[in-house]
Image (cartoon, grey):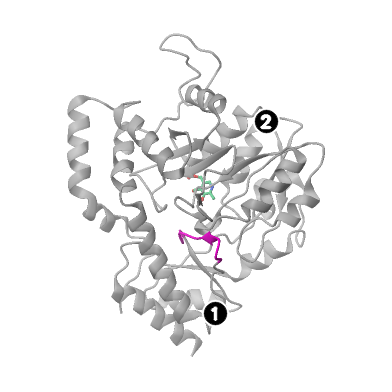
Amino acid sequence: MIKVPFVNLGLQYKNYKKPILNKFDLLSSNGEYVLGKELNKFEKEFANYCGTKYAIGLGNGSDAISFSLISLGIGPGDEIIIPANSFVATAWTVANTGAKIIYADVNDDFNINPDSIIKLITKKTKAIIPVHLTGKICKINEIEKIAKKHNLHVIEDAAQAVGAMYKSKKAGSFGITGCFSLHPLKNLHVHGDGGVLTTNNKKIYQKILKLRNHGLRNRDECEFWGYNSRLDNIQAAIARIKLKDIEKINNKFKNIAKIYNYEFSKILEIPLDDKNRKSVYHRYVIKSNKRDQLKKYLYSKGIETKINYPIPLHLQKASKNINYKKNSLLNTEKLSKRILSLPIYSELTDQQIHYVVKTVKSFFD
Ligand SMILES: Cc1ncc(COP(=O)(O)O)c(C=O)c1O
């Protein structure tokens, strides 16, 4: 039996060990830990990669969403529309501002449904947070039109979508801000928590530079109460090393997805691809009515899978005060019972990929 873990971070480290240890040694010898040159360089390179004017390295991706909301003045009395199918961070960052979370339903490609958004807009709506889930950009052109018509901000939750494209533009370059996670499970990741925010808006850029650093204007003067959320200089150095390879890394994800799509197209509902929206397949998510049996079967054969996400946000206990009931966001709920994420990462070997293919097929045989 071949073992196929859901992730294998140790293997990626092996490939990058030398440059990472060299940088670690250099920065540790210089004592450059916080807000150093590596961070500045990473921010320039990441902005350049995404096609935005600015990027700001943060302690995690959640703070990128939080700081976007705070810098736009969002708070109690405001309503923010988000998809019900996402990681919990898309929701709690809104709740933390005091604004009300408004959950929208999703399409079959797991991303927020623009028609669902339109029905939810009220006088209190201030922003939409579309999530580019699984590494595929949502219907951003339609969302931009809705936002323009109703004078709403678009904050892109691009945590899972570094390098994802809509036509010739990259995730993070559409909204007022783009919010990325550098968590170890993401295509571009550091060795711990990390995040980065992109924007073309100078005012927001300047505000978030202070927000992440206690609200300090300079060493001694505090303009407003802020936070401590800076991407460490050593983490920025690791991010720079990996950013150089991100196209290569993303291509590996895409190639595995291509093999899976080809092999599974007749037996499973495979992720929908789209001419204009090129996914980076942060997750490879299939749909099946026999999801739970398939998951168990694969596990018994040494293949680890996950469900992203088994409990929709509106049905989480944390949402109880928002008063959503079962059967209120039908597609999200239906998907949560049928979706399964198969192993996909740049270190998967050909042998492992073909073992996954063979084993999934043997289940359906
Ligand atoms: C869709 C989504 N939004 C937000 C986040 C939050 O990112 P982080 O864990 O870096 O705070 C994540 C990652 O975990 C995510 O997948």
Q: Which residue is mark 1?
A: 268
Q: Give residue 215's mark.
A: none
- Could you classify mark 2 by the number of other residues whose Cα lies within 10 Å: few (under 14), some (14-19), or many (20 or more)? some
Q: Residue at x 41, y 77 (%)?
A: 300
Element class at badge 1: loop
Q: Which sits in the foreground, 130 or 276? A: 276
Residue 46 x, y percent position in the rendering = 40, 40
- Is residue 248 toward the left or the right of residue 88 in the image? left
CB contact under 8 Å: marks 2 and 1: no
Q: Residue at x 53, y 64 (%)?
A: 307
Residue 347 x, y percent position in the rendering = 30, 63
The answer to which of marks 2 and 1 sits earlier in the sequence is 2
Residue 141 x, y percent position in the rendering = 64, 52
Q: Which residues are magenta?
A: 274-282
- Is residue 183 toward the left or the right of residue 139 in the image? left
Magenta-highlighted stretch: main secondary structure?
loop
* Residue 20 on the magenta span: no
What amino acid is labelled 2 in the image? Ile
Residue 361 x, y percent position in the rendering = 45, 84
- Is residue 211 toward the left or the right of residue 233 in the image? right
Q: Is residue 185 above or below residue 44?
A: below
Q: Residue at x 31, y 47 (%)?
A: 244
Q: Quadrant of the N terminus?
A: bottom left
Is residue 101 visible to us here? Answer: no
Q: Which residue is mark 2?
A: 74
The CB of the residue at mark 1 lies under 8 Å from ligand 1: no
Q: Is residue 18 above or below residue 346?
A: above
Q: In terms of image quadrants, where is residue 45?
A: top left
Q: CA distance from mark 2 to mark 1?
A: 42 Å
